[in-house]
Amino acid sequence: MSLRLKLLLIIAPVFSFLWLIASYFSVTQLKDEIHQAMDNRLVSTARMVSNLVLSSQQTNPTFGLEVTRPFNDSGSAKGLACKISSLNGEIIANSHPDELNLPSVLPSGFDSVAIEGIKWRVYTLNTPHHSISIAERLSERQSLFIEIVLVNALPTLIAFLVSFIFIWFALGRELRPLQQLRKAISDRSPQDLKPIQLEHNLVELTPLISSQNRLFKKLNKVIEREKSFTDNAAHELRTPLTGIISQLQVAKVTEGNDREKAIQQSLYSATRLQKLVENLLLLARKENRQAFQDFEKWNLHSELTNVFDELNLSKDHINVQVDASPTNNHMPAFAFNTIIKNLLENALQHGLADSAISLVIQETKRRFTIKVTNRAVLSHHTLENMTQRFWRASSAQGNGLGLAIVKTFVDELDGRMDFIYENNQYFSVYIVFPLDGDLTH
Amino acid sequence: MNILLVEDDPIIADAICIYLANAVMQVTPVASLKEAKHYITVCTFDICLLDISLPDGSGLEFIKVVKNANLSLPIILLTARDAIEDKVQGLNDGADDYVTKPFDFEELVARINSVYRRSTQQQNSYLQHGELKYDPNNKQARLGDKPLDLSAFELKLLVAFLSNPNRILDENQLKNDLYGVNDDVNSNALNVHLFNLRRKVGKNIIVTVRGLGFRLAPPEALKE
């Protein structure tokens, strides 16, 4: 059901109910007024007849008519009926002798009597000489009342209908911005995430459009991020693959040293691709929470030696400080190995050439920390994006997964990773693992 | 044909240089936008092979630089991005063709020749000046019906002249076509190759324009 119809269905009964209450009181009032006016007419008529009788009595006490003979026997079913009688009950005149068989003398004032099934409203005026009764059929009053009500009901009904039509169009007009908003959203293509620009004066609509535009902005950001991720992933995967294929094509058309060099280059690219795939598998491995929870104790020094061997580094290249228990059970050995290897690789690849690298590992009762520091020139943009998958500051080395993997592992182990960049040259990656389950202190 | 290659991956750049050199093309490799911007201001290239993802920015930015400078440098985008919108954006920004990685070198060479033909408004897939003809598909030069036995440098020289039949080419342009812009070679080496080319093709074919450089003789002179 449309909002317009729903609003009309709410407004119409309320409107009609109020109108009916008002009409009920108006009609009741009208009925009373009609009765009052008709009664006044009876009183006026009785007084007028009384005056006429008094003035006529002086010349002819029976108005020239025989006693008991009606002065008007036309028998009209409408209008007033009149009966004049003497004080002893003798009827002097009766306009409706067949119908108006009133008791001989009635007390002064109004009375309602039923004669042969017909209800009358009677006003009796008793003077010292006569008794004059003016009567009117109540059905006549009722007919008049119904006639007046009907005459007034028709324009009221028309006013009702016109009001509803007016409300219907007014609602349509006022709800048009909602229609425009619906159209603006339904007509746009899925790729179109530009903000909605709608001219309207509905205060209630502004926050709705603002929320919608904020949602579009967020969606746009997410889509951009996903596109950037896909582009970077495609670039990282296809670059070594292109290296392999293109160098093999070169090897196919060359001989001697050129051919040998091309094969070496394609092998290098294959190794690079292998490493990338391994890193991706490593990221997939973190999904297996079990691997991070069930592990045996391992020796920190021998694991550090493994890392240095894998990176083909001697400890002379790096300033290593270990202030921790040789036996570690805070994280699985593969996680420690990966974190240290990636941090050192990152420092070697992106730090200033020949600058010192320091690795500090500390353990207290409450926390286990790893800090790798080196000299590097980093932009604000780099610092913001360096943990994004496939993002890298320069494309010559690495595959943009190193810090992303470290971050994923740290999160998985409920740790925290922070970057510290001091004096625009000393860059540190600082990782804290809480041993008491609390990182706040 | 003198090609500017803007590619940050040294292995891919190396393969392209070797393969295209084998196809009688001279490639000047650069690894960043900064270098590429510098080279187009100091040298003339026939075609640019451009990677989009570069360490110091997007290759699309380089297209804008080329177009703003009104340089007639056809650009072939060489990229790992294969989404339709990326291709459309690259071509709309002013690139002449789009090759996705990994690519086949035969296709790349065919596209380079195609773009080059379009940019020089050639009707045929071969270069011809009078009776002198070079077919890049089989790397064969002919004078009339007679095949010419030319070394790689002589062939590069001949292609440089055939690609610019009505222009005077100075020594630097010819050296760039032969060795690329990075190699510093002396004039004697160029003169030796010119001498050998004249000897094999005909001494009147390449005319020396004193103080300016060299050009191809008019087609009718080749018959003498």
Image (cartoon, rainbow, N blue to C red):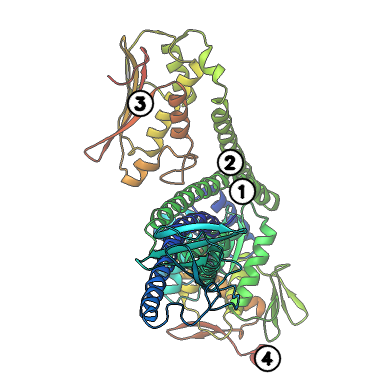
Label 3 is placed on what type of residue? His
CB under 8 Å between discs 1 and 3:
no
Nearer mark to the viewer, of 4 and 1: 1
In the rendered image, residue A302, in percent from the top left (x then y), is placed at 45, 12
Q: Which residue is mark 1?
A: A242
Chain of the residue where label 3 is placed in the rendered structure:
A
- The residue at which mark 4 appears reads as B224
Sooner in the amino-acid sequence: mark 1 or mark 2: 1
Q: Regarding mark 4 in the picture, which secondary structure is present there?
A: loop
Give the residue displayed 21% in from the left and 38% down from the top: A423
Q: Amino acid at mark 1?
A: Thr
Label 4: chain letter? B
Q: Which residue is mark 2?
A: A269
Q: Secondary structure at mark 3?
A: loop
Give the number of the disc on residue A317: 3
Q: Quadrant of residue A406?
A: top left
Q: CA distance from mark 1 to mark 3?
A: 34 Å
Q: Are marks 4 and 3 on the same chain?
A: no
Amino acid type at image mark 4? Glu
Label 1 Cα crowd, 10 Å radius (few <14 / some 14-19 / many 20+): many
Of residues A402 and B155, the one drawn nearer to the viewer in this rendering: A402
In the rendered view, tell whether residue A215 sits above or below residue B93: above
Q: Secondary structure at mark 2?
A: helix
> Crowdedness of circle 2 by 10 Å Cα count: few (<14), some, many (20+)?
many
Tell if the residue under mark 4 belongs to the same chain as the one under mark 1: no
Q: Is residue B43 visible?
A: no
Q: CA distance from mark 3 to mark 2?
A: 27 Å
Image quadrant holding the C terminus of chain A, namely: top left
Residue occupying image coordinates x 52% and y 45%: A229
Q: Which numbered disc flags the more N-terminal residue, 3 or 2?
A: 2
Q: Position of residue A414 (x, y in %)?
A: 42, 21
